[in-house]
Image: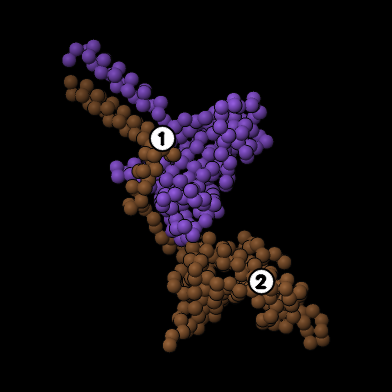
Chain colours: A brown, B purple
Amino acid sequence: MRILLAVITAGLALGAAWGQSARYSDPDSPEVESAARAALPHAKVLDIVGVTLGIEALLKDLNAKVTEREIRIELAADVLFDFDKYVLRPEAYSSLAKVAQVASHYPEAPLRIDGHTDGKGTHAYNMTLSERRAEAVKQWLVEKGGVRASRVSTKGWGETQPVAPNKNPDGSDNPEGRQKNRRVELTLTTKQEDGG
Amino acid sequence: MPIHRIALLFALSAAWLSACSTQSPPSTASTPASTPAATPSAPQAAPPPAAVPAAPAAIKAGDTNISGIVAEVTECSRKEGVLSVKVRFRNTSSEKKNLNLIENRDYEKYYVTAANKKYFILKDTEGTYLTAQASGFGNLGVGLDPGGQYTWWAKYPAPPAEVRAVTLYTPVAAPLEDVPVTDR
């Protein structure tokens, strides 16, 4: 008799467990949608911190210039974009992810993105290219990096703010200088000017 | 208790179990002629009946760890704080394949990441995950005939509205990155 009861109990338990698979069979049913909404307050969402470098390591990797009021990061346009393009190269993602992590350390700090080109091409063309490149960086940081769009501003400067000469003293082309000028600068204002 | 009653109880239990087992996940073996991303290796088949609705288009696709089975995200939509995800697993090979989607009820191997957050499948008040359910033994395996497909689904807490794309992690494929999120 005990064996019989054990067998029946096991059978019932097995059947009940098996029967669970019938629940929520239709993902588009009102029952599932209702259950999902009801489950939201208890949702499991974790911060990804295990792969996050410390802020110091990030700043070092990015060769950032840190002052009392701001963090300035300069990214070479040749790494971010193909020649004459404003679509980000996959090679740019790791650097931008680090920028996003730095930005996440200062969640309220405004982030300015400035695009620059070298001296080749017309002024109008360079202005447009630099604006679009700055905008592309912003879009990535917002969509992939979780940076709030409202704290990001962009501006294209074209060739107007070189950091190296585009030409040598003898008038010949200076490709190294032009390469330095093709860049995107990101400035995180970590301490606002006192008002008044 | 007489032996015939014992036999009757066994028979009832067996019948119940048999009925329940039909609720295990179906594996559609029909050739998805209307599937947009059909590969050249998919077998040719007669046109589907007119009543068969067109398969949803894949918005992201990738290979799985099982040769010949591809994973295609057909839905990644956000509504009222819930992210609905569907992935169609399709056998593009010429032989039958088995795909073990869940083992030991480990639903948490299916998660979504976005903006430095990791989102797990929602659970109802009884602790039941809102996803394609494993059997009572804790497993979910599907057998896919050539051209056959199975659609897995899950409900997640939705990332913030500014997040436009997520990465979906599963134990059966490399992460599906940059899956666009649509708002319903």
**Which residue is at 34% across, 34% downward?**
A20
Question: Dot 1 corresponds to which residue?
Answer: A25
- Residue drawn at x 64%, y 70% is A131
Pointers 2 and 1 in contact (CB under 8 A)?
no
Give the residue number, with chain letter if any, for mark 2.
A130
Q: Is residue B87 left or right of residue B15?
A: right
Side (left or right) of A149 relative to A167: left
Q: Which amino acid, by three-letter code, is at mark 2?
A: Ser
Label total for image: 2
User: Residue at left 40%, top 47%?
Assistant: B121
Gap in angstroms between the C-alphas marked 2 and 1: 51 Å
> For this rendering, which residue is in front, A106 or A51?
A106
Of the numbered discs in the image, which one, if any, rests on residue B128? none
Q: For residue A119, say whether it is visible.
A: yes
Q: Is residue A94 visible?
A: no
In percent of width and height, residue B173 lies at 53, 45
Residue A85, position as x, y percentages in the image: 70, 64
**Discs 2 and 1 lie in a common subunit:** yes
- Helix or strand or loop: what does disc 2 sit on? helix
Tag 2, which chain? A
Determine whether the residue tagged by mark 1 lies in a helix, strand or loop: loop
In the rendered view, tell whether residue A116 sits above or below residue B87.
below
Q: Is residue A129 above or below residue A40?
A: below
Return the residue nearer the eye: A156 or B89: A156
Quadrant location, the C terminus of chain A: bottom left
